[in-house]
Image (cartoon, rainbow, N blue to C red):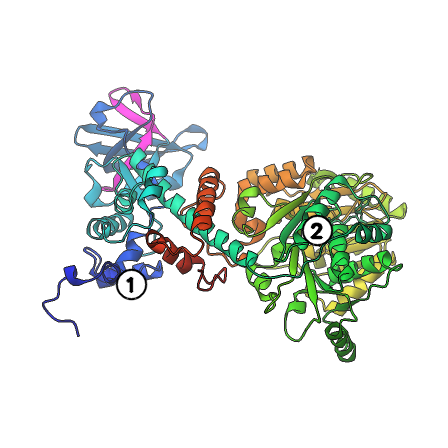
Amino acid sequence: MESPDRTDADLSPKQRLLTPVAKVRGVGPYRAEMLARLGIRTASDLLFAFPRDYLDLSDERLVSELEAGEMQTVRGTVVEVATSKSGFGKTRVSVLVRDASGHLRATWFNQPFISKRFFDGQAVLLSAKPKRRGLMWEMSHPTVTNLAQEEAESDGKKMLPIYSLTEGISQYYMRKMAEAAAEEFAEVPEEVFPEALLAKYSLLPLGEALQAIHQPDNAEAMEQARRRFIFQELFIMQLAVAIRRLQQQMQFAPELPTSTKIDARIRRLLPFELTESQTKAIEELTADMALARPMNRLLQGDVGSGKTIVALYAMLVAIAHGKQAALMAPTEILARQHAETLSELLTASRVHFAVLAGGTSKADRARILDGILEGEINVVLGTHAIIQDDVRFKQLGLIVIDEQHKFGVKQRAAMRQDDQSPHVLVMTATPIPRTVTMTMFGDLDVSTLRELPTGRQPVNTYLVEPDKQQRWWAFVRDRLREGRQAYVVAPLVDESETVSAPSVSAAYEQLTNGELEEFRMALLHGRMSSIEKQEVMDAFRAGETQVLVSTSVIEVGVDVANASVMTIAGAERFGLAQLHQLRGRVGRGSHAGFCGVLMVDEVNEQGRERLEAFSKSTDGFELAELDFKLRGPGDLFGTQQHGLPPLRIADLRRDREVLEEARREAQSLVASDPGLKQLDHARLRRQMLLRYGKALELGDVG
Ligand code: ADP
Ligand code: MG
């Protein structure tokens, strides 16, 4: 029971921040319920619910003060809304607004629906460059911000915060509630940063920043407040990443150095000279593996840059030391394909390998598991099922994960063994922008394959407009008649009623009865059983099937050298990196590769821009950066899959410089105080554990 004479002053800051939001001035039980939908339950939640945007009102004026030609804002009340038709069927909406000094007319042509935004007595802000027409000031197509009645007159504030809202709460009340929370609670939370750090980066102290982010005096104050919180968010993330890295380096791994003898033995197995990038990557990873702490390396390289061989090299080093290696692929198709590559390359060696897959019979599986446990099997291939359940190794020295972006931090963590950890090499053909490797993959070292093996040709890519499709299919038929094979890719398995996108079943239907009826075709998609998929792939690889109609399950790694032409329908639904992956399935052998992107009329401006970039650039890194710019990191890699909580205020695209700064500082702080044990690091440590402790499995830190 609370004692009746207890006041807020008796509560600790933490207790005060946990005050139910209903008790904040101006909230009450009804709005508290609405706020709960936004996840705002306490005073602290409200305090840290930052505006998503601001309206700069520094150019706000009375109508009588307006000047022609400059961007200005007027605040007033709607007194008349009229829609008229001019000649040629054009409509004109005219809204008359009054303020204390006079009248202003706002006009819109051919946007009849805009009249619905206004009613008599509605308070608004209108921003545009005004023009004088006769006796009246006029704004053509101004930006409109609706206000509450209470805001009809200026309170002198130069910045109007705009919040993310839920139904039942207006901007006005949200502003009021946030203002109240800022006034009452902004000084309550304790500063997170040590004094010296605030000074070094000229960051606003927490209390001041909280006040300014909700109620900035001007644009500069708002920027300063935002910068502080962006820095804080990125800094705490980078602390977590640095600490996780440190923890990894404190684990033990078997030392697997490479000798000239081992190197010569491995090179003898390779059918070609390694590229310069491959040699460099191998140097980097063999240096890692020679140490008594686990390698954690990301190998990125464009489609066809030859990552598999690099991985094979690493596996053979492990095997040379009597250790086992595991290679995990995102799909069984890929795992089997890797097995095939290995069996070709390793015919001359005594390396034993086995595939663990869904289709393996019980008896076979038992025998394989036994072989792994006894150490007779040197290399195990499969999907991530390998790290699950009952697979026990005799001496696992190395794990290779192909196409890392499908695996998360959690899975990587799950592969740790008790006393000794295996070395880990992750590979991705989706080039990862540097900002992203610094965050989601911040705990990995990176090797990059920059060039393609000589003789490989870039894939010629064409945007096929609707009226050119006949010609495209004629081109595809020509390639097929020459003996090549073809892929046709569509985003969906079946026609869907809600999503209007092409499906493989419809494409198959249409092509078998039309454009490609004379050829042997097959369907492939993720809903088929693994045995069915395998049969289809085997038939295609053997050339029995000429055309494979598939969803993006063939996106990664599928390697059929005779396939030279790909058609992609519904391309606007794929990310650029993904399209580049898909395209990488052709032109893998000695035959030039071709990719046709079937365009539809409905593709919007940005979609067209992306597809045009795709047809012009053959550089996966460039495309990944562009995708990142246009669509953000989520689409590329699926932040959720990595298990990291989403960023709230920082934006990796915009805040790259702050990220670099925060990263350097976080690294040096962790170097000087690895457990964040210093008194003035306690709050940072708490914040970090709160946000990333679980996601990154940081344990108790120090
Ligand atoms: P990815 O990086 O896309 O996984 P792969 O490892 O599948 O690429 O290699 C693509 C193709 O290039 C394979 O057929 C492989 O045998 C071949 N390859 C790899 N390295 C070289 C090289 N140094 N010289 C010639 N061909 C190579
Ligand atoms: Mg590959």
- Give the residue type at disc 1: Glu
Which mark is drawn over residue 113?
none
Q: Residues within 10 Å of mark 1 (few under 14, many from 20)?
A: some
- In the image, taking residue 666 as reference, residue 537 lies left or right, namely right
On the image, numbered disc 1 is attached to which residue? 33
Q: Main secondary structure of the magenta part?
A: strand
- Give the residue type at disc 2: Thr
Ligand 1 lies under 8 Å from the Cβ of mark 2: no
Q: Secondary structure at mark 1?
A: helix
Residue at 63 percent of width and 38 percent of height: 622
In the rendered image, the quadrant that contains the C terminus is bottom left
On the image, numbered disc 2 is attached to which residue? 286
Q: How many marks?
A: 2
Residue 149 forms part of the magenta stretch: no
Evaluate if marks 1 and 2 touch, with contact meaning CB atoms under 8 Å apart: no
Residue at 90 percent of width and 45 percent of height: 482
The residue stretch that appears in magenta: 118-140
Mark positioned earlier in the residue sequence (1 or 2): 1
- In the image, taking residue 482 as reference, residue 356 lies left or right, namely left
Q: Is residue 139 above or below residue 352?
A: above
Residue nearest the observer in this picture, 501 or 94: 501
How far, Cα to Cα, is label 1 from label 2?
58 Å
Residue nearest the observer in this picture, 3 or 442: 442
Where, by quadrant of the figure, is residue 450 drawn? top right
Residue 135 forms part of the magenta stretch: yes
Toward the bottom, the furthest residue is 363
Residue nearest the observer in this picture, 518 or 433: 433
Residue 40 picture location, percent across and down: 32, 59
In the rendered image, the quadrant that contains the N terminus is bottom left
Of badges 1 and 2, nearer the viewer stands 2
- In the image, taking residue 256 as reference, residue 146 lies left or right, namely left
Q: Secondary structure at mark 2?
A: helix
